[in-house]
Amino acid sequence: MTDATEVDVLVVGAGPACLTAAAELRRLGVGRVLVTDREAQPGGVPRHSQHTGYGLRDRHRVLTGPAYARALAEAARAVGAEVRPGCTVTGLQVGAAGAPPADESGPDRERPAAVVNADEPRCDRERLAAVVTSARGVQTVRPAAVLLATGCRERPRSARLVPGDRPAGIMTTGELQQRVYLNGERLSGRALVVGAEHVAFSAAVTLAHAGARVIALVTDLERHQSYAAFRAGAALRWRTPVWTSAVVTRIDGPGGRLAGVEIADVGGGNPRYVPCELIVFTGDWIPDHALARSAGLTIDPGTSGPAVDTALATSSDGVFAAGNLVHAAETADIAALSGRHAARQIAAYLGGRPAPAAGRPPRVPLEVATPLRWISPNAVTPGCPPPLGRFTLRTAEFRRPASLEVRQAGRLLARSRPRRLIPGRPVRLAAGWLAAVDPAAGPVRVAVSP
C-alpha cells in the first residue's frame, strides 16, 4: 500500500457521532480530519426523519431531523473537517503492514509517540490503513487514528426468520422513511407495524403521512416499550391498537404482492389472519459492525458492537468507536455526545500524553447478570469516566422499580436508586463508583438487587 493519503484522523461514517467528533477534533487542534460516508449526503438517519426533537442535549435547541443533519455537517466543515460522502471504507488494517493486528495484551506495551499539529507522522502509519472506495476509484488512507461510528440498523424480516412468501411491501423503518421523506413516495393500503418501541410509533406516523392506514402495532412482549404519551397519542390521533404477546408467524404474498400475515399468540396459540398491503419491521437493533469485525476488533457479545473501554478505545491501539455502533440504539443527540467524548480521547492519544486508552493501568471488564442483557462501555479504565459520566444498560424483562448493584469480588461499590426496567429502553447507571474499582480485583459485575 504505497502512494497513500495521510490524515491525522479517519472518521468512518457521517452521522451525528461522526460529524460532532470531527468538529471537536478540529477545535482541539487536530490537523487533517477526514470523514467518509457511503451515503450521498452526510447527516445519517436524521436526514430522513422529518419529526422534531433533535439536538436538545448537544445543540441546546430543538430541530427537525433534516435541519439537525445540516447543522452538524455545516459545523464540521466550518472548522475545517473534510466531509466526503459517497465513499465507502471497504477495508481496515489495524496491524503492521503484512502482519496481524497489534497485540494489546499486557499493561506495559508501548504506544507510538504523537504530537498534534506537528509536521512529523503522529503514529506508525504502517500499522493503520483503510481502503476507501468511491466513484473516483480506490484510495488508500493512512491515518494516525481511526474513529468508527457506522451506527446501527434494524434487523429486516430475513434476519428475524419470518417464513412465508417474499412479496413487495415489506420494509424496515429506515427504508420507509427514505422512501417517504427523501423520495416523496405515497403509500396506500393497510399497514402493520412489527414492534412497539419508540421507533415503531415513529413508523406509524410516517405511514400516516404517506397515506397508509395503520391497523395495529404488534409486539411479542407483554406491553409496549415506548412512553405512555406516545401510546396515548397513537390511540387518540389514529386509533391505532397495540397487540401484545403476539408474533408474525407467516407472510402471505401470492403473485408478488403482500396480501396479509398470520399472527399467533406467543407460545403458538390462537393464530389469525390479518389482511394488509404493507408491513414494517421496526427496532430489534444491531450495530453496523461489518467493518469492525473484518478488521479483527473484539466484539462484545452483549452489545454486538466493538468492545470499548470508558475512553471508547477498542481492542486495537489507535482505533476508537462511538455512537450507535458501540451499542444500539440511542437518540441522535446522545450519539453526538458520545462522538465528542471519543474526539477528546483521540486528541489526547495523538498528543502523546498517557491517555486512559493507553492501557495503564489495565482495563477492568464489566459484566452483567440476568435479566440485564449488556452494559456499555464494556470495561473500566481507571481515571477516565464514560461518556456523560454514566453507563448504559439494557434489560430483557419488564421489572417493577428495582435497584442495580455494582460489585467487585463480592464488595459492594454502589447501589442505584429504584427505577423501572423496560426492554428496549436505556437503563442509566451513574459512574460515581469508578474511584472504588480495584484494577487488580477482577471484573466488576452489575446485577438487579434481589
Image: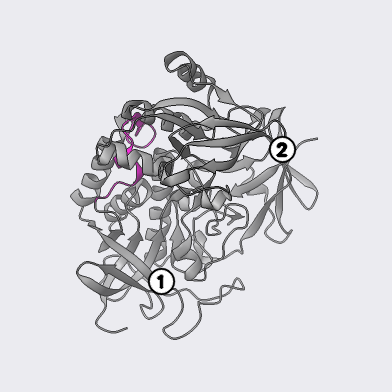
Q: Position of residue 167 (x, y in %)?
A: 44, 46
Marks 1 and 2 sit apart, C-alpha to C-alpha, by 45 Å
**Which region is colored magenta?**
41-61
Give the amino acid at mark 2: Gly
Per the image, label 1 sits on a secondary structure element best described as strand
The residue furthest top is 236
Which disc, if any, is residue 268? 2
Q: What residue do we see at 49% from left, 19% from top? A: 229
Location of mark 1 (residue): 92
**Mark with earlier residue (1, 2):** 1
Three-letter code, disc 1? Leu
SS of the residue under disc 2: loop
Q: Is residue 264 left or right of residue 100?
A: right
369 left or right of 285 in image: right
* Residue in the image at 47% along x and 37% along y: 259
In terms of depth relative to the viewer, which is nearer, 297 or 229? 229
Q: Note whether residue 30 is visible.
A: no
Q: In the image, which disc is placed on residue 129?
A: none
Q: Position of residue 294 (x, y in %)?
A: 48, 70
Label 1: few (<14), some (14–19) or many (≥20) C-alpha neighbours in 10 Å: many
Dot in front, 1 or 2: 2
Which residue is drawn at the image coordinates 30% and 31% (left, top)?
64
